[in-house]
């Protein structure tokens, strides 16, 4: 199986009704544990190089480590995904290095902290998709910013995230806007904002922390066909 794109994995998962885990990796021990678990359960995996990991270990080191794992476990389908690229140039470098999937996070500017406009997000994501698809690489987009609806405080993931106070509109992805975004950009997957910076933690402490009613989830299902993450 070896290295495949995220779109290939997601399409297969959608057809056969299962989920795919995505793991950020920083070192050999994490990588081996992921692959051994995948082999034991006969599961495909998405292995991610986060912004923090790329800064800590370097994209080239991570790439060689993931490729070595693929060589040792050839029976496991693996997507090598660059997480949270803050510009088309960042994504271009990852594509040139052999990543099979990239995320273009156009919800924030190149500094990874300043919220952008919808039009900016569409433009940088569309350009990334055109470049990536020409190379057989899938693209994940992002629409919305992490944050807490209760406090309005922005959140972050591995060093990438807005700062200060955000509006509710910035922290909640609108289903119709998401459908328009996918149509205009051609992304293969989309990360959305649901008004919380860490769902699992928030649910454990505040069961009411998920802001979306069932009706809003149904709106997404009705208007939106692209995989969301």
Image (spheres, rainbow, N blue to C red):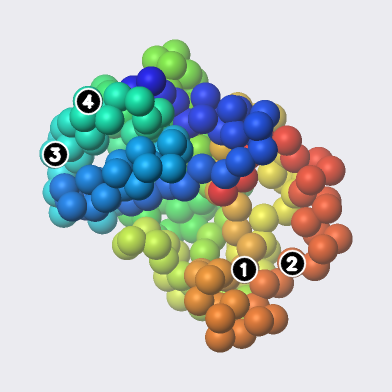
**Disc 3 from disc 4: Cα separation:** 15 Å
Which residue carries the number 2 mark? 212
Are the residues tagged 3 and 4 within 8 Å (C-beta)? no
Q: Position of residue 89 (x, y in %)?
A: 32, 33
Tag 3 residue: 61
- Residue 195: numbered disc: 1
Q: Is residue 97 above or below residue 57?
A: above
Classed neighbour count for the residue bearing mark 3: other residues with Cα under 10 Å, few (<14), some (14–19), many (≥20): some
Q: Nearer the viewer, mark 3 or mark 4?
A: 4
Q: Is residue 8 left or right of residue 11?
A: left
Q: Position of residue 39 (x, y in %)?
A: 35, 38
Q: Which percent across, then down, holds residue 97?
A: 23, 26
97, above or below 125, in the image: above
**How much space separates mark 2 and mark 4, taking CA atoms?**
42 Å
- Label pair 1/3, CB-CB below 8 angstroms: no
Kind of element beneath mark 1: loop
Who's the residue at 45% across and 38% down the image? 43
Q: Earlier in the sequence, mark 1 or mark 4?
A: 4
Q: Is residue 91 visible?
A: no
Q: Secondary structure at mark 3?
A: helix
How many residues crowd mark 2 within 10 Å: few (<14), some (14–19), many (20+)?
few
x and y percent of residue 168 in the render?
A: 66, 69
- Image position of 149 (left or right of 145): right
Q: Which residue is tagged 4?
A: 71
């Amino acid at each position: 199986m070896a290295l495949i794109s995220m779109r290939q994995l997601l399409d297969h998962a959608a057809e056969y009704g299962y989920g795919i885990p995505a793991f950020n990796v920083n070192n050999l021990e994490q990588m081996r544990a992921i692959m051994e678990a995948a082999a034991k359960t006969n599961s495909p995996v998405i292995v991610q190089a986060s912004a923090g990991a790329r800064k800590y270990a370097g994209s080239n080191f991570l790439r060689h480590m993931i490729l070595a794992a693929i060589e040792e476990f050839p029976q496991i389908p693996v997507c090598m995904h660059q997480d949270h690229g803050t510009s088309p140039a960042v994504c271009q470098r990852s594509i040139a290095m052999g990543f099979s999937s990239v995320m273009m996070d156009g919800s924030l500017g190149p500094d990874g902290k300043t919220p952008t406009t919808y039009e900016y997000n569409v433009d940088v994501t569309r350009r990334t998709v055109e470049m990536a698809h020409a190379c057989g690489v899938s693209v994940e987009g992002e629409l919305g910013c992490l944050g807490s609806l209760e406090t309005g405080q922005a959140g972050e993931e591995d060093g990438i995230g807005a700062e200060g106070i955000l509006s509710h509109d910035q922290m909640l992805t609108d289903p119709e806007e998401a459908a328009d975004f996918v149509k205009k950009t051609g992304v293969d997957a989309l990360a959305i904002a649901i008004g919380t910076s860490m769902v699992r933690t928030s649910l454990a402490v505040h069961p009411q922390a998920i802001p979306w009613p069932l009706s809003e989830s149904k709106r997404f299902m009705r208007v939106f066909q692209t995989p969301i993450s």
